[in-house]
Image: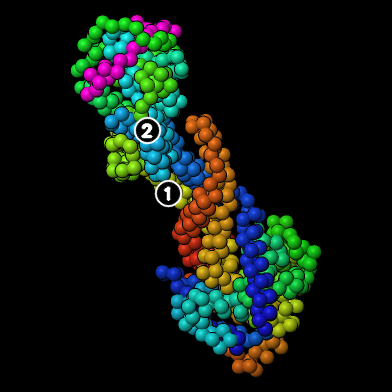
Amino acid sequence: MLLELEHISKIYGDLHAVDDLNLTVPEGQWLSIVGSSGSGKTTLMNIIGCMDTPSKGTVTLDGRVLNDLNAKQLADVRKNEIGLVFQKFHLVPHLTALENVMMAQYYHSVVNADEAREALAQVGLADRAKHLPGELSGGEQQRVCIARALINCPRLILADEPTGNLDEHNEQLVLDILRKQHSQGTTIIVVTHDTAVAQCSEREIMLNHGVLVGERWNDEQARQRYEAQGGLPASTGAHLEGVLADDQTIQRITKQ
Amino acid sequence: MVNIHTAHDVSNRRMFATMIRGAVFRRRSRALMAIVATLVGAATLFCLAAVCIVVPQQMRDDMRSFGANLIVRASDGGASTQDVRTITQDVTAVGDAQSATYRYENVRIHAAPYMLAGIDSNDVQAINHHWSVDGHWPSNGHIMVGRDVATALDLKVGSTLEIAYRADDNAQFGSQTQSTNQAQSTNQANQGQESTQSHSRDGRVSTDILQGGGTKFQVGGIVDTGGNEDDIIYATNHDVNQLAGERGVDVIEFAVDADADTLFSMSQAIAAQDGLSVPVSARQVSRMTSSNERIITMLQTLFWMVSLVVLALTLVGVSTTMASMVGQRRNEIGLRKALGASSWSIGMEFCIESVLYGVIGALLGIGIGQIVASVLCQTVFDRSLPFNPLLALITVGAAIIIDIVACIPPVRRAASIDPAVVLREE
């Protein structure tokens, strides 16, 4: 398995942002983490993305236990293994689209302008390379963000609400890019509350108040492959008291 | 392999420069704040330092025109021209100096004895700018009389009078002349002259003897110093030689650009000089020297205090600006860290950026400081201020150090930013 989460919890005082979650993700899988605001999905993404550490439990990425790593080692894992896509893009405003992509190369290893241009071309922005983020539309900025995430060929793409600020047309453009990456074998984990985006993935898990409340497979073949690899369903040792999961989602999961 | 590594280093260095350039030149308003903060400090520092380097020199020059600070007295008929030259060479070897010689003779006017001093008008005027002269300084055939003498003899500019010289007067009053010479030199140092005052009143010695005749001179000017000069008649050396015959000078005054210790050493060295035709004694005029040095010390202390305040204010200004920039760039810093940037890398970027602000601010500040200092020197001291490259280098260095020190707290804050927290704050 590329990613293994064992009984992980993130606790802030009395608040359990993520509560006793078990999850395994094999290489090449497209997983969606769904849930309403405050459900703990971004916290989970930060833990998977080595930007946060769990209060309890173990995170293993490609066989490497992350709990034991210091800040610098976590930064190394981040830049070598993970590509990050944010809802609000987080482009550096005083660098051009090309320079924003090259910046990820700079912190990773070696800057190569040709490769950065190629990455922009892959997301359809070859002619916008010299533009500053302020001169780009939201969809274009998100595509620059994706090009930046892809430039170092990460094994895992973590996307937090990648279409949250986009119109329908740009949403489709971004999803097409993710589909293309997935078809090339890249593991993708998307955090979203958008049903349409979640349905593009092979597998969905749902969180509510930090607790896993459901799991659903959108691709039966993917499920079979996963189980053949020895993959187990996501599970939790916690239970939600007095809180009901989003009705629509439960309904959807129940139908399975 | 080495070439590949070199190419990689070059491309990464170029990217680093691009990021810094982008931060500085594409975020002009923010960069401008940091640059202006440094500029103000650098300009003030450079201007103050430039002026404070010039002012002591100007002070010394000015003080040298307000009287002598070293007086050499000769006995036994006065120092010869060669003696004067030798002593002057000794003095000028230590520092810039202006000198004036005095030859004193007792003369009679309307049978009353007066003191006549033979001088070179230009030399005496150069080191006695504070003398108030109504009319002209002595020239051949024209004398300058002290205010008290003019009052006693009812003289005005343009009046004529006869001056008689009697060799036996100078022999008779030899000891008095010696005493007067000594008193005169003391007077040049603005010190009291108790002995002469006990013998004279309104410039007249009390032992008047009725005897007339002599050489006619026209009063060219009346000098008023409020000191013993008011009791003396000044004529050119030429006229005194014509009147009393040629001999050496009794007193040589120097206005030397030197401190008190140097003057003391010099006075001892001159007194011990054995290559002169007559014995001489020398002493410094301590009041003039010490007041000069006191003012310069006060000015320099003031400069250092103001400089420290300016440096502290610059430090606070730059630090505040950098802190503000870090605050505004929290998301960017969080993003960089999320992309794998180390805290050291983030810190270095901000430090280099800060140094760049320091260099730009310092260069602009030096330009402005030079203009302000030049205008100040021209207006107040009436002298030009040449550009001081060493001072400029020091200013740039100081600005860079200040900017680095100022950016340490903001950089530490930037380096400690948690990417997860920042990126979550959407």
Mark 2 vs mark 1: in front: 2
- Residue B186: % across, % down: 28, 28
| Residue under pointer 1 | B312
Horizontal side of B96 relative to B282 (left or right) equals: right
The answer to whether residue B218 is above or below residue B320 is above
Q: Quadrant of residue A247?
A: bottom right
Image quarter where the C terminus of chain B lies is bottom right
Q: Is residue B152 magenta?
A: yes
Q: Please name whichever residue, B417 or B56, is drawn nearer the observer in this view of the structure.
A: B56
Q: Please name whichever residue, A18 or B99, is drawn nearer the observer in this view of the structure.
A: B99
Residue found 43% across the figure and 21% down from its top: B238
Q: Is residue B117 magenta?
A: no
Residue found 54% across the figure and 50% down from its top: B389
Image quarter where the N terminus of chain B lies is bottom right
Q: Please name whichever residue, B372 or A101, is drawn nearer the observer in this view of the structure.
A: B372
Chain of the residue where label 2 is placed in the rendered structure: B
Q: Quadrant of residue A111?
A: bottom right
